Image: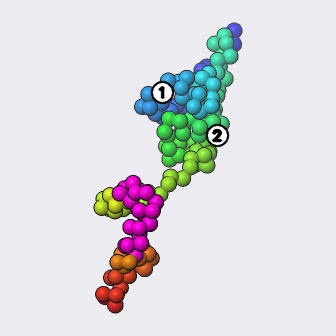
């Protein structure tokens, strides 16, 4: 019988498996989340498909498929690029949403915001009206409050 040697696992295989185990996902769970069959996942990670009788065919994941797998297990596009899968890295960047910018407020501002958010809308409007009356509700682009401008300039 004509046997073909089993192909070597792809360079991304150890990365995928380590990340999957770190997330404590079974192959079944991870494959389902990535919209890949369990057999497909195993073939992608092993780099081979058994054709029976000791013969194998090399398997290389499509960029889009590998990007979905990477997204499920938390692999970054930089990590994919480092193992030579720039195509999958680009595909991952396309399917990964941009993170929402997180405003960097100080703890006192966060506390005031939390208090304001707990107030009913009419009470919020009254607080804002009173701050405006005191000159403390100036727009940020003015570089300070109206009250400060009257005192300094």
Relative horizontal placement of residue 38, taking residue 115 as reference (left or right): right
Determine whether 113 is above or below 131 in the image.
above
The answer to if 125 sits in the magenta stretch is: yes
Q: Which mark is residue 128?
A: none
Residue 46 at x, y percent in the picture: 56, 25
Please state, as top left, top right, bottom left or bottom right, where the C terminus lies in the image: bottom left
The label nearer to you, 1 versus 2, is 1
* Mark 2 residue crowding within 10 angstroms, few (<14) / some (14–19) / many (20+): some
To which quarter of the image does residue 131 belong? bottom left
Q: Which residue is mark 2?
A: 64
Q: Which residue is mark 1?
A: 25
Q: Residue 96 or 65: which is nearer the viewer?
A: 96
Determine whether 114 is above or below 135 in the image.
above
User: At x 49% / y 39%, what residue is drawn?
Assistant: 74
The structure's colour scheme is rainbow
The residue range painted magenta reads 114-132
Q: Residue 6 or 38: which is nearer the viewer?
A: 38
User: At x 58% / y 28%, what residue is drawn?
Assistant: 31
Q: Residue 88 or 35: which is nearer the viewer?
A: 35
User: At x 63% / y 13%, what residue is drawn?
Assistant: 54
Provide the secondary structure element on which disc 2 rests.
Answer: helix
Asked if disc 1 and disc 2 are in contact, CB closer than 8 Å, the reply is: no
Q: CA distance from mark 1 to mark 2?
A: 21 Å
Relative horizontal placement of residue 119, taking residue 81 as reference (left or right): left
């Amino acid at each position: 019988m004509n046997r073909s040697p089993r192909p070597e696992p792809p360079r991304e295989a150890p990365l995928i498996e380590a990340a999957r185990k770190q997330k404590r996902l079974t192959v079944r769970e991870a494959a389902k989340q990535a919209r890949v069959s369990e057999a497909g996942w195993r073939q992608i990670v092993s780099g081979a498909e058994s054709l029976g009788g000791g013969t194998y065919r090399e398997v290389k994941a499509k960029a889009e498929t590998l990007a979905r797998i990477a997204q499920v297990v938390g692999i970054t596009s930089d990590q994919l690029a480092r193992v030579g899968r720039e195509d999958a890295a680009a595909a991952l960047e396309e399917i990964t949403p941009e993170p929402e910018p997180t405003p960097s407020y100080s703890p006192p501002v966060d506390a005031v915001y939390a208090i304001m958010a707990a107030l009913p809308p009419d009470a919020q409007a009254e607080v804002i009206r009173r701050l405006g009356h005191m000159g403390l509700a100036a727009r940020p682009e003015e570089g300070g409050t109206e009250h400060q401008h009257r005192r300094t300039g």
